[in-house]
Amino acid sequence: MRTDISERVERHRAKLREAGLRPIQLWVPDTKRKGFAKECKKQSLLLKVDPQEREIAAWLETIADKDGWH
């Protein structure tokens, strides 16, 4: 059973490679880590008063394609 799954995964990956894709490994913050929410809040509060952040947010708002979003 395990071999069957491994073979299917490898065939699937081979098809993706044939299509010109390659796998990558992506590391993201651990949202379950102690202190994560506190750090998010801290960074959000810092951005809230940052004039450059307001400018960037305003620019993003003008270029955003929101068609189909509610």
Image (cartoon, rainbow, N blue to C red):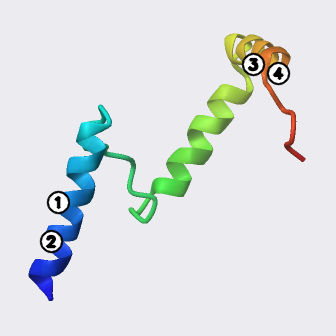
| Res. 3 image quadrant | bottom left
- Residue on which the image places disc 4: 61
The residue carrying pointer 3 sits among few (fewer than 14), some (14 to 19) or many (20 or more) residues within 10 Å by Cα, namely few
Image coords of residue 7 (percent x, y): 14, 69
57 to 32, vertically: above or below? above
Residue appearing at x 43%, y 65% in the figure: 32
14 to 21, vertically: above or below? below
Look at label 1 and name its amino acid.
Answer: Glu
Given residues 60 and 19, the one toward you in this image is: 19
Residue appearing at x 15%, y 79% in the figure: 4
Alpha carbon separation for disc pair 4 and 1:
42 Å
- Tell me whether circle 4 and circle 2 mark residues in contact (CB < 8 Å): no
Closer to the chain start, of discs 4 and 2, is 2
- Tell me whether circle 1 and circle 2 mark residues in contact (CB < 8 Å): yes
Q: Which of marks 1 and 3 is in front?
A: 1
- Tell me whether circle 4 and circle 3 mark residues in contact (CB < 8 Å): yes
State the mark number for residue 10. 1
Number of numbered discs: 4
Given residues 6 and 26, the one toward you in this image is: 6
The residue carrying pointer 1 sits among few (fewer than 14), some (14 to 19) or many (20 or more) residues within 10 Å by Cα, namely few
The residue carrying pointer 4 sits among few (fewer than 14), some (14 to 19) or many (20 or more) residues within 10 Å by Cα, namely few
The residue carrying pointer 2 sits among few (fewer than 14), some (14 to 19) or many (20 or more) residues within 10 Å by Cα, namely few
Alpha carbon separation for disc pair 1 and 3:
40 Å
Look at label 3 and name its amino acid.
Answer: Leu
- Residue on which the image places disc 2: 6
Left or right position of 3 against 40 = left
Closer to the chain start, of discs 1 and 3, is 1
Image coords of residue 52 (percent x, y): 68, 10
